[in-house]
Amino acid sequence: MAEIVLLGEPMVVFAANTVGKLEEVETFTRFLAGAEANVAIGLSRLEHNTCYVTKLGNDPFGRFIEKRLHSEGVHTQIAYDQSHLTGFYLKSKVVAADPEVSYFRKNSAASWYGPEDAEWIDLSETKLVHVTGIMPALSENCLQATIRLMERARENGITVSFDPNLRPALWKDKETMIARINELAARADIVLPGVGEGRILAGTDEPEKIAAFYQRKGAKIVAVKAGPKGAYVLRNGSGSFYPGFHVENVVDTVGAGDAFATGFLSAYLEGLTIAEMAERANALGAMQVCVAGDNDGLPTREKLADFLDQNRK
């Protein structure tokens, strides 16, 4: 079916066209958003065969999302829900720091995706299954669906990658979030936490200790995102820190972690070295923060090569 299968909740985002509080903004521009969708698009642009799996409302937003994914060359396995709507959110425009975000996703169609749906995902040609901590936070159904997909991947010898992508507002409480996210991470071969996430999930903001925490849980590779500083990658007990790329003008940090995941996983699938995986991941993260859309900065192979030629130290 596809080299890479991703499970998640894609959404429509309306990004403000002017700086200011969301309640004061008059006009917005529509984009496709969602962590897993961003990674799917990024991998497709790098010429990897991807399939995105989800449940959407039978509404204009749902149909827009499917068409947008197809326009990027992403295959889809979408179940349309007649009773629930596709989620969306609003995002402010800022000149510094992170934007204000307001979600409209409670009881969305994706939150009704369950373990019985995961049984029908075709993994016959799959080399990698990628999931995040967002889908499991939507509902117990989604949590069990994510677990079942990870189990099926393991049963078939398929590599599983996991990005915590913490969304505290979606969980019942902090303790539940930490427990469930770390349980999911223990089922993955590749774990991609950020330093801030490590502080919450592993009790430390030191990249080396975060990586060791997840390697003790069973991860074969842990890549800890440290923002503009770069990333620390640990594999089989051997770790190194890889510096990031300098960015003159940061436009929007949303989607940077997804860009990092795209770069790292694409390089992993191509059999590159750890240093090359980290370099590509850091490069994509830097390219993404230079644009407003959640995935507009994700490059083709040609654009990536140009960026590396111009920015390698």
Image (spheres, grey):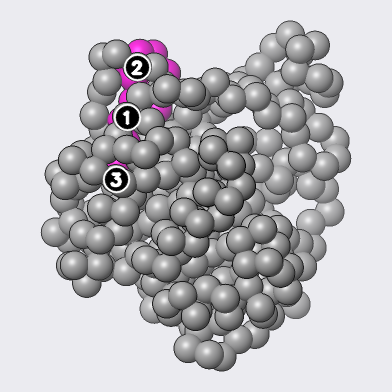
Locate residue 122, reporting x and y percent.
16, 50
Locate residue 103, reporting x and y percent.
59, 25
Q: Quadrant of the C terminus?
A: bottom right
Question: Of callouts 3 and 1, which one flags the residue occurring earlier in the amino acid sequence?
Answer: 1
Give the residue type at disc 1.
Answer: Trp
Residue at the disc numbered 1: 112
Badge 3 element: helix
Looking at the image, residue 62 sits to the left or right of residue 39; the answer is left
How far apart marks 3 and 1 lie (CA) works out to 10 Å
Q: Is 239 within the magenta?
A: no
Q: Is 62 within the magenta?
A: yes
Residue 18 lies in what quarter of the image? Answer: top right
Residue at the disc numbered 3: 145
160 and 76: which one is in front? 160
Give the residue type at disc 3.
Answer: Ala
Question: Which range is magenta?
Answer: 53-66
Question: Of callouts 2 and 1, which one flags the residue occurring earlier in the amino acid sequence?
Answer: 2
Q: Residue at 56%, 55% (x, y): give it.
A: 178
Badge 1 element: helix
Q: Is residue 278 visible?
A: no
Q: Residue at 73%, 41% (x, y): give it.
A: 252
Residue 2 lies in what quarter of the image? Answer: bottom left
Residue 210 lies in what quarter of the image? Answer: bottom right
Q: Crowdedness of circle 3 by 10 Å Cα count: few (<14), some, many (20+)?
A: many
Give the residue type at disc 2.
Answer: His
